[in-house]
Amino acid sequence: MSIKKVILSGGGTGGHIFPALSIANEIRKRYPDAEILFVGALGRMEMEKIPAAGYKIIGLPVMGFPRKPSLKIFTFFKRLLQSASMANKIVKDFKPEIAIGVGGYASGPLLRAASKSKIPTLIQEQNSYAGITNKLLSKKVKTICVAYDNMERFFPAKKIVFTGNPVRENLTTKLNDKTEALEYFGLSGNERVVLIIGGSLGARSINNAVMKNLDAIAKSGVQVIWQTGAIYFENIQNELKNKKPANLQIHQFLSRMELAYSIADVVISRAGAGTISELCLVGKPAILVPSPNVSEDHQTKNAMALVEKDAAVMLTDKEIDAKLFQTAFEMVENNELCQLMATNIKTLAKPEATKTIVDEVEKLIKQ
């Protein structure tokens, strides 16, 4: 068989975009002539990241449902109708053999339009607590690829396939060879390293905790590599002009995550599903700080799935000013604990996730 035309839809955050790109890359690897079209939400991150990765994308005017009662509700429904109409036209003109949704606003109208046109549909749910769009779509789609146990709480059991989450392909290539990483970060190799990542957009509360603990960092003797996120980088640089500890490196964005992971002894991170899947794959001890600003508090549920298996430590947003660095520096000096967590988190990895998802795509097209 061969796959000729595929639509991938969703986005909003790196947690939706990176899995979508991994799936697209695997399809292209197997079927170099396949035409792959992305459908995203106008003004969201995917409209920049997808073309940068070499794929075509069309944006829908769809937006999230307003959380508080306001006049925005009228804008929401107006844009939803416009998006539904555009999605119908995209499906009719492009004629895909399959439509794949990865979560995010745009995947709702697009997958509805595809299933209405009798095109096979598949969704990939990254989180342990299903998003609203995917819950609504689950009645219409043929296959639901998941990364956590007990997802029949949200989806029809007969449609669920346990695949794990797709992660960036190059993550494990540099893990065992630290030479390039040490050179890249200008380190000697004798340092203990704590890596701080706040998700693709950064994390305000984690960044604030760093700023409040500069003295503790300076005295720790631990090298701290800190990804601030684009929104916060400039302000932080200005604030740190004359008081940046020598053992603190700040980066707007870490484009070579595989090198950062390879030298990290402990990782401080949000608990987005994509990041957790990466941590499992690279087998790194982690302190997870779930974002309190996500729907259904799903990051806490993601984090707890690891905490219950002694595979990570969790701190709430409210605790981190006082406890984050004390916990991190104690962990980094405790080899036995780090080894135990690394072993436990690695058992949760699904290195073949992307391939398994594309196997499911092939099955649906064959049917």
Image (cartoon, rainbow, N blue to C red):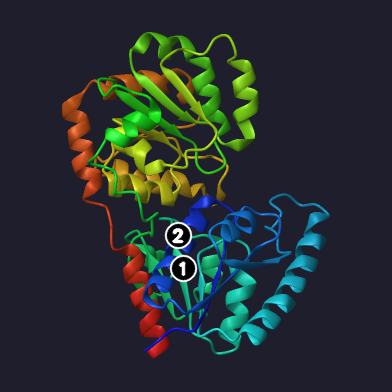
Residue 287 higher or lower than 84, as above or below: above
Q: Position of residue 254 (x, y in %)?
A: 47, 38
Residue 262, horizontal then vertical, whole percent: 30, 37
Q: Which amino acid, by three-letter code, is at mark 1? A: Ala
- Tell me the quarter of the image containing the C terminus: bottom left
> Rounded to the nearest whole Å, what is the CA distance between mark 2 and mark 1?
9 Å
Q: Quadrant of the N terminus?
A: bottom left
Residue 318 in view, yes or no: no
Question: Residue 222: x percent and y percent?
Answer: 34, 18
Please give left or right for residue 62 compared with residue 117 in the image: right
Q: Quick one: label 1, few (<14), some, or many (20+) residues within 10 Å?
A: many
Residue labelled with disc 1: 24
Give residue 313's position: percent from left, percent from top. 33, 34
Q: Which residue is mark 2?
A: 19
What element does badge 2 sit on?
Answer: helix
Give the mark toward the camera: 2 or 1. Answer: 1
Side (left or right) of 112 relative to 32: right
Q: Nearer the viewer, residue 195 or 309?
A: 195
Specify the amino acid type for callout 2.
Answer: Pro
Residue drawn at (21%, 44%) of the image: 344
Q: Earlier in the sequence, mark 2 or mark 1?
A: 2
Image height check: is 253 above or below 360? above
Viewer-proximal residue among 55 and 87:
55
Horizontally, is 307 left or right of 140 in the view?
left
- SS at mark 1 in the image: helix
Residue nearest the viewer, comparing 258 with 307? 258
Circle 2 crowding by C-alpha within 10 Å: few under 14, some 14–19, many from 20: many
Q: Is residue 262 above or below residue 63?
A: above
Q: Place residue 292 in its image quadrant.
A: top right
